[in-house]
Amino acid sequence: MTGGAGLDPGLVDAFLAHHLAFRPVDATFMGIDGHDDRLPPAATGTEAAERAGLDALQDRLAVQPEPSSPGDRLDLRLMRSEIAIARAGLDHRPRFLNPAWYTGEAAFAIIALLLPQSQPTRSSAVAARLAALPDFLADGRARLSGTATPRGWADRARREATAVAGFLRGDIRLHTDWSESWAVPAEAAARALEDFSAVVAGLPDRDPACGEPYLAFLMREAHGLALSPAEAARRAQDAFDRMGGELEEMATRIDPARSWQQQVEALAEIHPAAPEDVPASYRRLHDAAVRAAAGLVTPAPEYGLSYQPLAPTFRTVARDLYFLFYRSPPMARAGDGSVYWVTPPGGGDPASYLRGQNDALVKAVHAVHHGSIGHHTQNARARQAASRLARLGGTDCAAGIAFLSAGTMVEGWACYAEDLLLEAPGFYTPGEVLLLKQFERRNAASVLVDIRLHTGEWTLEEAKRFYRDEAGFAAARVDGEVTRNSIFPATRLMYWLGVEAIKDLRSRWRGGVQAFHDTLIGHGHVPVAWAEDEMRRAGQIAG
């Protein structure tokens, strides 16, 4: 359809009201009020209520003419996409049959209210959610009883349940706003988590593959990709093979006597002199990245980022949860800055801790990918996007971003930002350039696992072997990585494919480099392909 109409703002309001009624923990991370005392509904009949709401929204959207403004067009596309994805999820991958969904929501229903981004602490909301957890988990036990469940999902749920039960009995009391009114419901919630874990332990195993049709649907509907899973895998395989040779050639030019693996490992020896110097190294490298980005992209100096040691409240529980160093700020209540957690030294070997906080890793992963011009700047620009939903879609929630459709922009941009500073002379050392190439190769490897696992070409063991023996993932990381791949199809592929989409779009941009990057991320949390459509309509790209 064409036309000059504006989008009825009531549609976005209605969509958000429905969406967050079933995802109240997401609302807390988004900073949207009115949901902080609630847990997601999970009782029998929830699906029917959700489908009825989706059907009503879909009927309203079906007769909506194409809006005239970019923000309204993107809002309309996002609503249509999210409704289609939600319906398909209920039909093919219902969250109610994943035990890790229950434990993730249970954990972050409480933790989300205790993080710096949620301050001041809403004590009554914490108490209300703690009190609601036993019924929520009882619904989960009833849903899952006797249901075949992938072993990795069950193991993750049990690990999370144990961690959160321990947190509720212990370290939650270290929070500066601990209230004795939480003590009784916290103990009841801890017991409910243990009961839930006991049920999950006895569930029969099954294959986690979602199947090629569903994977293709997500690639098309969520990410706007024209590629089939087979074509995406072919491109990723070609890139993976090519980059193996490039790593060897690069290493030979730097030091013919050492392999690229040895040269990357040697980077761990370049680190701060003492553990107490680590947070300052994050800030120093963040500031260096901001300076290096001059002329390439406009950073977000107006929004602060404070590097702080992880608060004692969360140090133990963070080890077994999807607990991020950096979380997107609550878009609806962003304040004037974010806290970036720095892992403090534990009780082990200080030298080992310092090697893990080496300059190369901190520079690429923490200072660039997450901080400075990476997620930090992209999130700041998203808050100003014309599309209301594009301000929210990349919000980090209990198990991932709020809208899968945000993935190619959010993760594509952060990975692209790492490589963008290769264009800043002297920012990276030759060894650090090798590390970036290894990161890129691993992202291509993750496309292969995402696709070949979910189309049934690879078993879980084959995926683990590939990550460990060919892609070079640390052995301790492999099980968790493959489990995450298995739970969330079409997520790990969005990193490398997102970068490739940005590179292709840049090659067709008609203006300057900085203007391209600012324009791209100014669209907010939308698929890169949809940003491309808007840029084409504006006459900003060729082809």
Image (tube, helix red, strand yellow):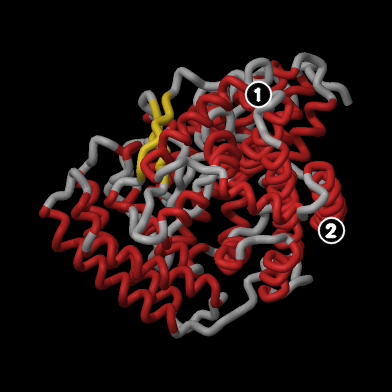
How far separated are the C-alphas under marks 2 and 1?
Answer: 35 Å
Relative height, residue 274 to residue 377 (above, below): below
Name the N-terminal-most of marks 2 and 1: 1
Label 2, secondary structure: give it: helix
- Split into 4 quadrants, where in the image is the N terminus? top right
In percent of the image, x 42 and y 70: which residue is there? Answer: 159
Count residues near mark 2 (Cα–Cα under 10 Å), then give few for <14, some for 14-19, many for 20+.
some
Q: Nearer the viewer, residue 420 or 303?
A: 420
Residue 134 visible: yes
Quarter of the rendering occupied by the C terminus:
top right
Amino acid on which disc 2 is placed: Ala
Residue underneath mark 2: 230
Horizontal arrangement in the rendering, residue 451 relative to residue 265 (left or right): right
The image quadrant that residue 511 belongs to is: top right
Where in the figure is residue 278, as x and y percent of width and height?
43, 40
Residue 527 showing in the rendered view: no
Percent across and percent down for residue 500 are 77, 40
- Which of these two is toward me, 316 or 206? 316
Q: Is residue 307 left or right of residue 167?
A: right
Q: At label 1, which amino acid type do we have?
A: Pro
Q: Residue at image x 41%, y 59%?
A: 349
Q: Is residue 499 above or below residue 207?
A: above
Label 1 belongs to which residue? 67
Give x and y (percent) for residue 362. Answer: 54, 41
x and y percent of residue 236 in the render? 81, 53
Secondary structure under the numbered disc 1 in the rendered image: loop
Whether residue 290 is situated above or below residue 262 in the rendered picture? above
In the image, what residue occupies the spot 46% across and 62% down?
101
Q: Is 540 positioned to the left or the right of 164 in the image?
A: right
Q: Quadrant of residue 369?
A: top right
Q: Nearer the viewer, residue 391 or 71?
A: 391
Most foreground residue, 74 or 255: 255
